[in-house]
Image (tube, helix red, strand yellow):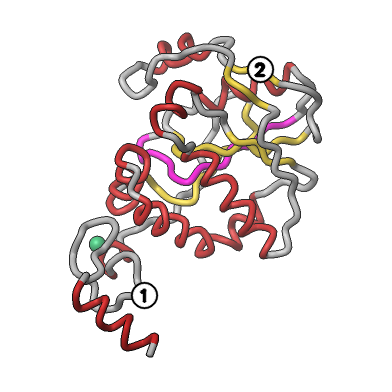
Amino acid sequence: MFETLEALKHLLWPTRCAACDVLLDDPSKLICDRCHLAISPAAPVPAPPAPLTSAWALFYYEGAVSNLIARWKYHEDFAAQKALFSLIPERIEALKAFVPANACMIPVPPHPHRLRERGYDPVWSFASRLHRILVQHALEIPFVEDRLVRTRHTAHQAKLSREERLQNLDGAFAVQGTLESPCILLIDDVYTTGSTSVACAQTLMASGAQRVDVLTLAQTVES
Ligand SMILES: [Zn+2]
């Protein structure tokens, strides 16, 4: 009965690839094979800026991943979010190898204005899903949501140069309370120049952190 209903649903509302909109033959898939094959696992960022110990992304920000992220972040497309998050377990072994021992996971905090505009926080969604997947794969790591906060309004980073990005973020973050661990795994959605991660890491180190590693969903290819 359930299968018949599913088949009927697929006939009436055919499933489309969340990245390129092509019709999918298999309704259980979220993206088409062409998009899936074009997704590249990212290598660690070579020589990340101080004080970051290391920076690594699950995927490069290109092709299907950039389409999915744009749809997810700017158009609140939850099919795109579901497709992106479904890719996380494909990187589980590399992910487990990257997470430092005794680290606690802290997401880059959203800007309150943008949180209000959007009604949800993409970075928090990614961090909480990532956390759940790590725990399911026997990697226990504390997920600390409100330790790092934004203290003031900052301009959109996308159109700024590297220098302007750093200035824009100067003093933009603060630590509330005491860090759970001196070893922080900072989570963000996209790594571009690293300026957001650097600003967060400086704040965390000033509050007692001894190392900050950054993990993102995607990394721009030129960074
Ligand atoms: Zn596709």
Locate residue 101 relative to residue 76 in the image: left or right: right
Q: Quadrant of the C terminus?
A: top left
Q: Which residues are magenta?
A: 211-222
Categorize mark 1 by other alpha carbons within 10 Å: few (<14), some (14-19), many (20+). few
Residue 180 rendering spot, x and y as whole percentages: 80, 34
Locate residue 43 relative to residue 25 in the image: left or right: right
Question: Pointer 1: what residue?
Answer: 28
Residue in the picture at 51% in, 39% down: 123
Q: Cα distance, mark 1 to mark 2?
A: 43 Å
Judge whether 103 appears above or below 174 on screen: below
Residue 13 rendering spot, x and y as whole percentages: 21, 70
Q: Give the secondary structure at mark 1.
A: loop
Question: Pointer 2: what residue?
Answer: 174
- Ligand 1 closer than 8 Å to label 1 CB: no
Q: Quadrant of the N terminus?
A: bottom left
Residue in the picture at 60% in, 55% down: 95
Judge whether 21 appears above or below 26 on screen: above
- 208 or 28: nearer the viewer: 28
Residue in the picture at 78% in, 23% down: 177
Label 1 close to label 2 by CB (< 8 Å)? no
Locate residue 36 relative to residue 202 in the image: left or right: left
